[in-house]
Amino acid sequence: MRHILTATLALAVVVAARAEEPAKQAPKVVLQSPDGKKSYDLGKLVEEGPVLVRLTCACSGCDKELPQFQKLQAAYDAKGLKTLAVFREKPEATSDYAVKKDLKFLWLADPQGELWKTFDAKAMPTNILIDKGGRVVKVLPGCTADGKNAQALSGEIARLLKTEEVKVIEEPKKK
């Protein structure tokens, strides 16, 4: 029995040590606007405050959760959050979508998926929260049309900015 307890404690120490591994630093990338006239240096953006990189597309799932991400940016904008949506569509389609949806954050087109390769993202969308200074804090793959990913990120962003968490999910109306 004592050996089982000792082995269990040793395993717990190893698991805890792995959980405390340092977070990855965000890659050094410079991204171009769809028209090629403006560039965005991710390293400079994270010097100013946290950055949420949203590797996304204009599919119906990503479209359904867009309102929560718009609310997220609006809620933390004055405190320094920058959201950068990187779409997998061609620049023209991305531009049309951004105008139609009245995007209130930075957006770029990456039809070849280069940033997906850089971040080793396997899911569409993938949300990557980077703290001020460039450490990747949270990676949330996949789509949640109910806004749960946006709400989870809201908690992390509030913690980074040392402020209260903002609710981005609409509460069901009571009948």
Image: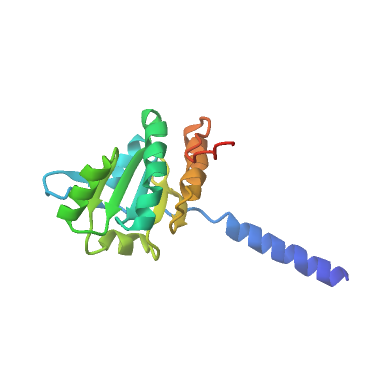
Q: Position of residue 68 (x, y in %)?
A: 42, 42
Q: Residue furthest front?
A: 175
Residue drawn at (37%, 46%), measured in percent from left and top?
Answer: 66
The colour mode here is: rainbow
Number of numbered labels in the structure image: 0
Q: Position of residue 69 (x, y in %)?
A: 39, 43
Q: Is residue 23 visible?
A: yes
Quadrant placement of the C terminus: top right
* Front-lying residue, 48 or 77: 77
Front-most of residues 62 and 47: 62
Residue 151, placed above or below residue 9? above
User: Which is nearer the eye, 112 or 151?
Assistant: 151
Q: Looking at the figure, which quarter contains the N terminus?
A: bottom right
- x then y, percent, for residue 132: 40, 39
What residue lies at 44% left-to-right and 59% top-to-bottom? 142
Vertical relation: 63 (above or below) 74: below
**Where on the picture, by quarter, is residue 78?**
top left
Q: Residue at x 34, y 42 (%)?
A: 83
Q: Is residue 141 left or right of residue 32?
A: right
In this orientation, which residue lies closer to the viewer: 27 or 34?
34
Q: Residue 26, can we see it?
A: no
In screen coordinates, is 2 left or right of 126? Answer: right
x and y percentages locating residue 174 in the rendered image:
59, 36
Residue that lies at the very extreme toward the right in this rendered image: 1
